[in-house]
Image (tube, rainbow, N blue to C red):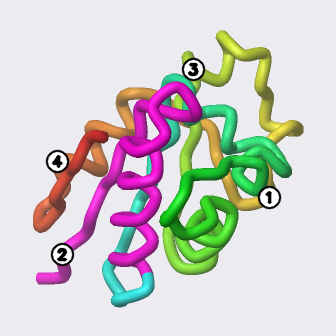
């Protein structure tokens, strides 16, 4: 049975270390061949928009834009439906490859056999 990793990022620039940890773990797992699903919720939802991840800076952290690219290249990135709506972010606004989905999809992924979910 293949294992999968579901990472929920709940922080953005408001808590940069927690945000960077979520992206780093997701990208590291994706680079290692793990099936990864990265969820952008709360303030991290802004990183679903073009250029936002590239503008994030945290000393001694890998560039967020590069980490996001790794996950997009091999896994899934999802912006929370309600979080996106609260920020007036629609499907036409997000980076190609980012989907917008809600709690039912998150629960389905997190409860799948062999899945491990982490929330940052």
Q: Name the element at disc 3.
A: helix
Mark 4 falls on what kind of element? Answer: helix
Local crowd at mark 1 within 10 Å, few (<14), some, or many (≥20)? Answer: few
Separation of residues labelled 4 and 1 (CA atoms): 26 Å
**Furthest-right residue in this view:** 92
Whether the residues at callouts 1 and 3 have beta carbons within 8 Å, the answer is no
Q: Residue furthest front?
A: 59
Q: Is residue 75 left or right of residue 66?
A: left
**Residue found at x 84% / y 49%:** 50
Secondary structure beneath dot 1 equals: loop
- Nearest the viewer among 55 and 49 is 55
Residue holding disc 3: 83
Q: Is residue 52 left or right of residue 113?
A: right
- The residue sitting at 32% across, 80% down in the picture is 34
Q: What label does residue 111 carry, if any?
A: 4
Tell me the residue that label 1 is attached to.
96
């Amino acid at each position: 049975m293949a294992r999968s990793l579901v990472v929920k990022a709940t922080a953005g620039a408001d808590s940069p270390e927690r945000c960077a940890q979520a992206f780093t773990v997701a990208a590291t797992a994706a680079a290692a061949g793990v099936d990864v699903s990265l969820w952008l919720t709360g303030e991290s939802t802004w990183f679903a928009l073009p250029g936002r991840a590239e503008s994030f800076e945290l000393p001694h952290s890998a560039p967020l834009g590069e980490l996001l690219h790794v996950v997009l290249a091999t896994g899934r990135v999802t912006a929370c439906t309600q979080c996106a709506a609260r920020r007036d972010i629609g499907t036409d606004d997000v980076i190609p490859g980012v989907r917008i989905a809600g709690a039912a999809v998150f629960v389905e992924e997190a409860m799948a056999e062999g899945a491990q979910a982490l929330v940052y």
